[in-house]
Amino acid sequence: DTLINQIAAGEVVERPASVVKELVENAVDAGADRIDIDLEEGGVRLIRVRDNGSGIAPDELPLAVSRHATSKIGSLDDLETVATMGFRGEALPSIASVSRFVLASRRGDDGHGSALPVEGGRVGAVEPRQHPPGTTVEVRDLFYNVPARRKFLRAERTELGHIEEWLRSLALARPDVELRISHNGKPTRRYKGGTELFSDDRLHETLGPEFAKHALRVDHAAAGLRLHGWIAQPAYSRASADQQYLYVNRRPVRDRSVAHAVRQAFGDVMYHGRQPAYVLFLDLDPARVDVNVHPAKHEVRFRDTRLVHDFVYRTLHEALADTRA
Ligand code: ADP
Ligand code: MG
């Protein structure tokens, strides 16, 4: 089973940032509104994610680290409407198979917490542990038992950069959640929670005042589709490919067809070859989009790609019309 989990880890866990993604998504799914992320050496030495979410019962800890045991969907039909970030039940077992791992948790109603250590996939015994309500996952020495994977890890700065980039994209989508990040014992970033989705505060915190100054608000709905968020006016000169954020039902994704529609709309008003900058949330009935295309869920498949493409193009074309010189 350890081997199967390690093979699955090949798809889910590429680098420390993928671990942070899976753990923080779990914390969000658990309803946390405060998440602490402590890192050492770019996350290679340590990733610790602590949340104030629902917590896990002691007897369910072993289930959480066993393969395909998700508490989030009960049947294949539920996949049609899945609203949580996770649903495949393979992140924790995969991560635990390639690290020194501890899952510690306490539900609000329970008198005490408990912890379950897993070492390179070998599941230990549940033991009592002091813990505030919520969950902590500790991942040490990522890939210590898979030298072939460890070789592909990059410099501390690079790995940290990937982690910060992913956290920024989450921060944009979840301004209701407070995120505190520390690296090698020093606080590096804090996103204040408790703000609404369209808050300019969060835009400032994540993409900086220059982007915020040039940001044009978009909010348009038609045919069961809604596109909202911000696009940077063509006058914004610091636009780059890493300021392109697309979310489908709040899940950060990459999508060729939407990216194409955006580029086409910007192409109408600015020189081709220049990068547009945007933060866009596309919302639609979950039944009209398949999120189970890739284990890491970076991609989606729309039931009607053409319709989505044209909707995005037209919405942005309109929004940008006033900026035409
Ligand atoms: P998935 O998120 O796809 O369900 P995971 O392997 O990421 O699968 O997690 C397995 C299970 O462990 C989840 O379904 C959930 O029940 C539980 N779990 C994981 N992390 C947390 C957390 N931070 N708080 C509460 N429950 C959690
Ligand atoms: Mg998960």
Image (cartoon, grey):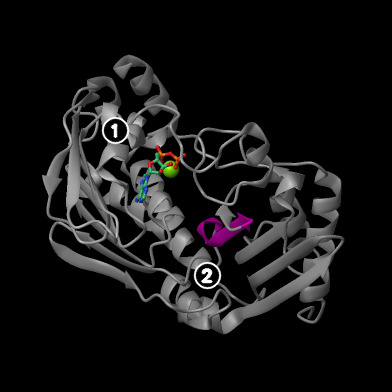
In this view, 107 is above or below 47: below
Looking at the image, tell me whether mark 2 or mark 1 is earlier in sequence order.
1
Question: What amino acid type should be assigned to the residue bearing mark 1?
Answer: Pro
- Examine the image and state in which quarter residue 280 appears: bottom right
In this view, 314 is above or below 90: below
Q: Is residue 164 magenta?
A: no
Question: Residue 180, position in %: x, y?
Answer: 29, 67
Question: Residue 174, position in %: x, y?
Answer: 49, 66
User: Which type of secondary structure does the marked residue at label 1 adopt?
Assistant: helix
Q: Which residues are magenta?
A: 241-249
Q: Is residue 244 magenta?
A: yes
In this view, 296 is above or below 226: above
Question: What amino acid type should be assigned to the residue bearing mark 2?
Answer: Arg
Location of the C terminus by quadrant is bottom right
Residue 314 as seen in the image, left or right of residue 302: right
Location of the N terminus by quadrant is top left
In this view of the protein, which residue sits in the foreground, 280 or 274?
A: 280
Residue drawn at x 85%, y 46% as measured from the top left: 306
Residue 157 as seen in the image, left or right of residue 306: left
Question: Residue 298, position in %: x, y?
Answer: 55, 42
As drawn, the label of residue 238 is: 2
Residue drawn at x 35%, y 52% as measured from the top left: 163
Q: Disc 1 marks which residue?
A: 62
In this view, 145 is above or below 223: above
User: Which type of secondary structure does the marked residue at label 2 adopt?
Assistant: loop
In this view of the protein, which residue sits in the foreground, 157 or 204?
A: 204
Residue drawn at x 38%, y 62% as measured from the top left: 32
Residue drawn at x 67%, y 78% as measured from the top left: 217
**Residue 151 seen anywhere in this rendered image of the structure:** no
